[in-house]
Image (cartoon, rainbow, N blue to C red):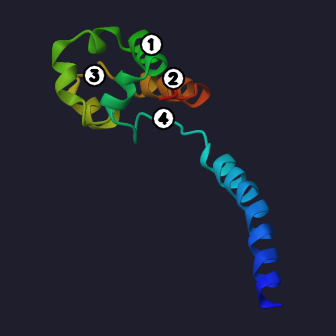
Amino acid sequence: MHKYLLGAALVAAGFALPVAAESAKSHAVTKAVYSAAATSIGTLMEDPVARAILARHLPAVVSNPQFEMARGMTLDDIAPMSGGVITESAMKAIDKELKAAAPAAN
């Protein structure tokens, strides 16, 4: 009798596993949102959509070779050192576009 119960439980578990895996997969596909305050410049520059947003709002900054040295920092981190080039209004506009854009798939 125990063999039949164990067999039935294993069969039921076998049917439940794909459903559980699919459910876990759908929860793992949460859209990440980039931001000027929390996302590193390196991450933004590696994403073609985010890079285009930065280039549109901060062309002089993105084209500056020193910008590459700040890959581990955020725009919030470097704004005070930008001599007024990275303004609050530019950061708000960048954030608005970043939130509307989905990060590129890896």
At 20% from the left and 22% from the top, the residue drawn is 68
Q: Amino acid at mark 1?
A: Ala
* Real-space Cα separation, disc 2 to disc 4, in angstroms: 13 Å
Q: Position of residue 1 (x, y in %)?
A: 83, 90
Do tag 1 and tag 3 residues touch (Cβ < 8 Å)?
no
- x and y percentages locating residue 89 in the rendered image: 46, 24
Q: Amino acid at mark 4?
A: Tyr
Q: CA distance from mark 2 to mark 3?
A: 16 Å
| In the displayed structure image, the side of residue 18 where residue 83 appears, left or right | left
Q: Which residue is mark 3?
A: 84
C-alpha separation, residue under disc 1 versus residue under disc 4: 13 Å
Q: Nearer the viewer, mark 3 or mark 4?
A: 4
Q: Position of residue 73 (x, y in %)?
A: 26, 36
Identify residue type, mark 3: Gly
Q: Residues within 10 Å of mark 4 (few under 14, many from 20)?
A: many
Q: Where, by quadrant of the figure, is residue 96 drawn?
A: top right
Q: Which residue is mark 4?
A: 34
Residue bearing the label numbered 2:
93
Local secondary structure at mark 4: loop
Query: Of the residues under marks 2 and 4, which one precedes in the sequence?
Result: 4
> Which kind of residue does numbered mark 2 sit on?
Ala
* Mark positioned earlier in the residue sequence (2 or 3): 3
Task: From the image, tell me which residue sits under label 1.
Answer: 52
Foreground disc of the pair 2, 1: 1
Q: Residues within 10 Å of mark 3 (few under 14, many from 20)?
A: few
Gap between marks 3 and 4, in whole Å?
22 Å
Secondary structure found at label 2: helix
